[in-house]
Amino acid sequence: MAEVQLKEKICGALRDAYFKDPNDLVDVSDGPDDSVHIVIVSRKFDGRRMKEKNDLIWSVLVQKLAPEEWGKVSLSVGASPEEIKAT
């Protein structure tokens, strides 16, 4: 299980940097072992390709966290609300 403090730091960094809208969903949860999974649902992803979404998420992580912290992230997913509705 990942440290609660690290999960809160990741969530705060993402919210402070880009996902401030109250409708943005930023979920940081436990992955395998002590890794972290991130799922973000936001209109900011409308019309963006997967690489653009990943670049947006990871630019924040690499800038705001130490390498040993962002190195714990084993999954990051960004989707628009429409993409979620279509599944």
Image (tube, rainbow, N blue to C red):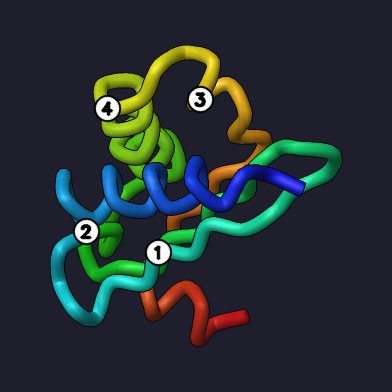
Residue occupied by mark 3: 69
Residue 64's tag is 4
The quarter of the displayed image where residue 75 is located: top right
First along the sequence among labels 2 and 4: 2
The residue type indicated by label 3 comes to: Glu
Percent across and percent down for residue 53 are 37, 44
Observer-side mark, 3 or 2, equals: 3
User: Disc 1 or 4, which lies upstream in sequence?
Assistant: 1
Name the residue that disc number 2 marks. Answer: 19
Q: Nearer the viewer, residue 29 or 39?
A: 29
Circles 3, 2 touching at the beta carbon (< 8 Å): no
Discs 2, 1 touching: Cβ within 8 Å? yes
Residue 33 percent across, percent down from the top left: 84, 39
Mark 2 and 4 residues: CB-CB less than 8 Å, in contact? no
SS under mark 2 = loop
Which class describes the residues within 10 Å of circle 3: few (<14), some (14-19), or many (20+)? some
